[in-house]
Amino acid sequence: LAAWGRTLQGLIVHHDQDPVYTSYRWLRQLLIEDGVVVSYCERGAKDNPWMESFWAHFKGENASLFLDASTFEELEWVIGRQMNYYNLERRHSRLDYRSPVDYLISEGFVPEPLAEIGAKSGSAPGAQAPSGTTGQPKGAMLSHHNMTENARQITEILDISQQDVFLLAVPFFHCFGCVMGILGAFTWGAAVVPMPVFDARQALELVEKERVSVLYGVPTMFVLWLEEHRRARDAGRPYDLSSLRTGIMAGAPCPVEIMRGTMEELGCNVCIAYGLTEASPVITMTRFDDPLEKRVETVGKPLPGVEVKVVDGARRELPPGEMGELACRGYNVMLGYFKRPQATREAIDEEGWLYTGDLAVLDPDGYVRIVGRKKDMIITGGFNVYPAEIEELLYTHPGVQSVAVVGVPDEVMGEVGMAFIIPREGVDLSPQEIVDFCAQRVAGFKVPRYVVITQEFPMPPSGKVQKFKLRELGEGLIREGEAVKLSPKKR
């Protein structure tokens, strides 16, 4: 409802449990900057402390109508009318007005009635919100064709059929869940086992109980599945995961060690998919018949009908083997950002190329290797350091469960790396141990000079680590003297 309302009629549905719409930043943009004219709040949410605080915070700024729970059917009809699947006379004969639209127009809340919008392939059924790892919210308008064709191609590569059962622990408001998951499963008539809140133990119990064959997740989820699998195995109570056939690891850089562990220990022949919301979402994907090293070390080749290239800072195409920004063109490119024409022009050029913001290398065989985000690159004493390389290295440390590397300011070097580490259960790691481990394996300028041992990372429901929050946290720890700069011990 939120996606339909926002795109078609300037409506927004939100409530106190919604993972996207429960921040002042998001709601301010939706209700004020994007010109939302009607707001609906789910039953009970209007009176909770969070919502009271929100409305008090924006009193005087927001001119939109607030609909309470008693008018949900009317609001639902306003949105549903665009697809003609509600019967006005049967459901709303009690209303004084001919329809809720007439009421909103007559009261001045909606400037003019919108024309009927059919489900045409080029129209946008929703504005998808990217996952919130950069802190800059924008709504990417995706067409019916964008999403349905992307879903079909992805699941065709996975050889999905009516016999398959998906476990979807990824959020449905995100392209991973609603396009790759729901649309992908429904394209072939496969079953879906939804998991509203991710929990590694419960997920593996569902795999066993429901005979799940297809597993979707971001790398963090696979890390936790592997840890839970190993814990149960070592305790003599292993899960029966024999039904697992395939799946997709996507949404963030996929460490080689995690990919190998998933295939060898979980017995899940996963593929890696790479993309972004603006690309509906998948651009490239590995295939079952790719060489093993390509399956674990690259994000595969482009989907049919999608072109890719690597460009320099001036957006000139680079030859294979050289690193630059990855761009794509094809049926999957979004229509644009919702009410963000300048941002759309910056992301998509006149020839239809979408610039991803990701650094990549295209090899002579057409496989893409993602190096990292342009904005994540650390410049240490004039040298470029790519966090993904250091994270990949640290995943090989036997005591590391999860890792995220960010750049923090340094008076001498300009920037240095700070590694946030979640240790494996029962493992006692020291920051110095991590620094020394890296120093023995990479050049000195690449070694993180700060290490923070923690138990969790800031993540939205999509499961992607929010590095901008880690960077803010790291800078605060340095200012307060709680993070100590380290040097490798001399051997």
Image: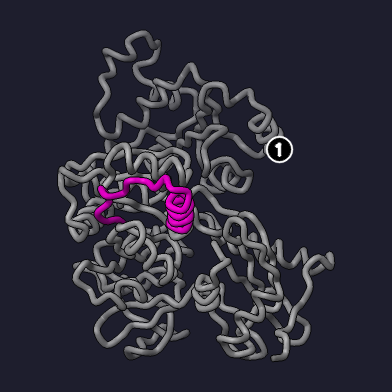
Q: Is residue 232 left or right of residue 383?
A: left
Furthest toward the right, the residue is 481
Along the line of sight, the residue nearer the viewer: 416 or 392: 392
Q: How is the image coloured?
A: one colour
318 left or right, relative to 303: right
Residue 339 in view here: no
Q: Nearer the viewer, residue 287 or 224?
A: 224
Q: Amino acid at mark 1?
A: His
Q: Position of residue 384 (x, y in %)?
A: 57, 86
* Residues drawn in magenta: 221-247
Residue to which mark 1 is pinned: 57
**Residue 103 seen in render:** yes
Q: Is residue 407 above or below residue 402?
A: below
Q: Residue furthest front?
A: 236
On the image, which quarter does residue 407 sit in? bottom right
The stretch drawn in magenta includes residue 224? yes
Q: Which SS class for mark 1?
A: helix
Q: Quadrant of the N terminus?
A: top left
Q: Residue at x 68, y 80 (%)?
A: 415
Image quarter of the C terminus: bottom right
